[in-house]
Image (cartoon, rainbow, N blue to C red):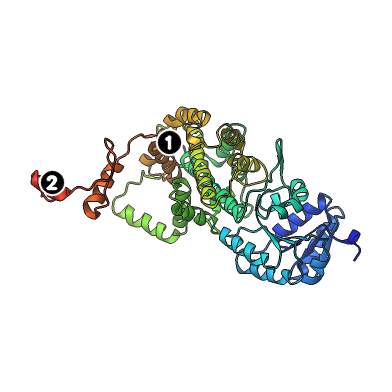
Amino acid sequence: MESAALSRIGLAGLAVMGQNLALNIAEKGFPISVYNRTASKVDETVDRARNEGSLPLTGQYTPRDFVLSIQRPRSVIILVKAGAPVDQTIAALSDHLEPGDCIIDGGNEWYENTERRINNVAEKGLLYLGMGVSGGEDGARNGPSLMPGGSQTAYTNVQDILHKVAAQVEDGPCVTYIGEGGSGNFVKMVHNGIEYGDMQLISEAYDVLKHVGGLSNSELADIFAEWNRGELESFLIEITADIFKVKDEDGEGFLVDKILDKTGMKGTGKWTVQQAAELSIAAPTIAASLDCRYLSGLKEERESAATVLKEAGLSDELGKTGVSGVDKKRLIDDVRQALYASKICSYAQGMNLLRAKSNEKGWNLNLGELARIWKGGCIIRAVFLDRIKKAYQRNPNLASLIVDPEFAREMVQRQAAWRRVVGLAVSAGISTPGMCASLAYFDTYRRARLPANLVQAQRDLFGAHTYERVDRPGAFHTEWTKLARKSGTGVGALN
């Protein structure tokens, strides 16, 4: 084949995300070959390319023809389901790839799988990138946030393509070389964990405004639209305003009220919480959002519990819509402030997890640059990410966003409203686990002394784990029970 006729890049895996990303690449002027095991998906993509502007996209129907249609050094993006399908696709393609060629996995993959594959394909002289892709179907087509990690040479080979394909913001394209190994996948995983926290906090704001404030969907649409013009401006706030406007086409009322209250998940939130635990990083907001998804799945149990507890005497007032005597205007403003302060905590937890993993793996992650590439294209894109970027530019070693001077001032200004919302929700029987977890995180982090001294004393009593003292160095152990009995107030003395 003449090199002029070869494609610049290839993409295998033509579900909607794959099709849209391929069309995005072609639309930016890069000839692309596409392949899928199911031939009809190839035909469908070729038809779309023709209909969407005669884009330079070529369909291939065998792994060999697909690989040979791409110019050397070949770069092939695969967008298939994470796990075994990725290994199967790599096996099918690598039979025809040559040393120096590169495979780019764009799925939500566990970072250790990427590191295993980097080593496996290196035996054949192949390069590998694990690239997080955020923004959903629309982002893939019109500009996603891209998080490629692995071989820097492989990144350099496709840098010009990725820079054009990614979402564009005022300070550049929403893509950067993340680091070595599985860093790209890990960063995307934490992005999704922050997304879990964000969505949970927004749902709690909705719950409080609806059930404590008694606000209608139309009022909620207006409130969220107004919030999207201020400090909370973000993709998730914008789409939430839109959701509240949609009427049910198959019945009366609004569609949001007809949706079953069970939230699905694909695993990245769970991985984030597991990694936080492994690295001893507190991530209570993200963990609370995951717990809420688990609890939402217990629909039948929750319905049964509501009946049992009502029969046991639980007040009808708890959880009912509209609490008397509530100042709606003040509530709306308080919830806005509580949501913003809680979001800062969620992002702080995610960033701290990224730093801890970077230190463990030697990835040298640039947290300010990660905040920058999340400003466009991705699900958590938000105006205040620019301020997170600047916080880490001011101080790359910032211990936590909470102690950045600007964010610290904002947290302090909002904490009274935050406490009012959480207190009001608790007294009204409305669960706000994300906001509560965020507030508890803030209150724990800001205290110079915690009751952990008692916990350590307990550990020393029953397990001889020793303790440190505040007034002298060293490790100490005390025979607590013996000394307590000697003083006459030992275990059981109160019985």
**Which residue is label 1 attached to?**
421
Task: Report which residue position mark 2 lands on.
Answer: 484
Q: Residue at x 41, y 44 (%)?
A: 430
Report whether 331 appears left or right of 11. left
Q: Nearer the viewer, residue 364 or 171?
A: 364
Q: Is residue 242 above or below residue 306?
A: above
Q: Within 10 Å of the Cα at label 2, are there few (<14), some (14-19), or many (20+) other Cα atoms?
A: few
Residue found at x 56% / y 60%: 112
Q: Amino acid at mark 1?
A: Val
Q: Which residue appears at 61% of the width and 56% of the height?
A: 181
Compare marks 1 and 2 and give the one earlier in the sequence.
1
State the SS at label 1. helix
Q: Nearer the viewer, residue 204 or 285?
A: 285
Q: Amino acid at mark 2?
A: Ala
Which mark, residue 18?
none
Q: Position of residue 398 (x, y in %)?
A: 51, 36
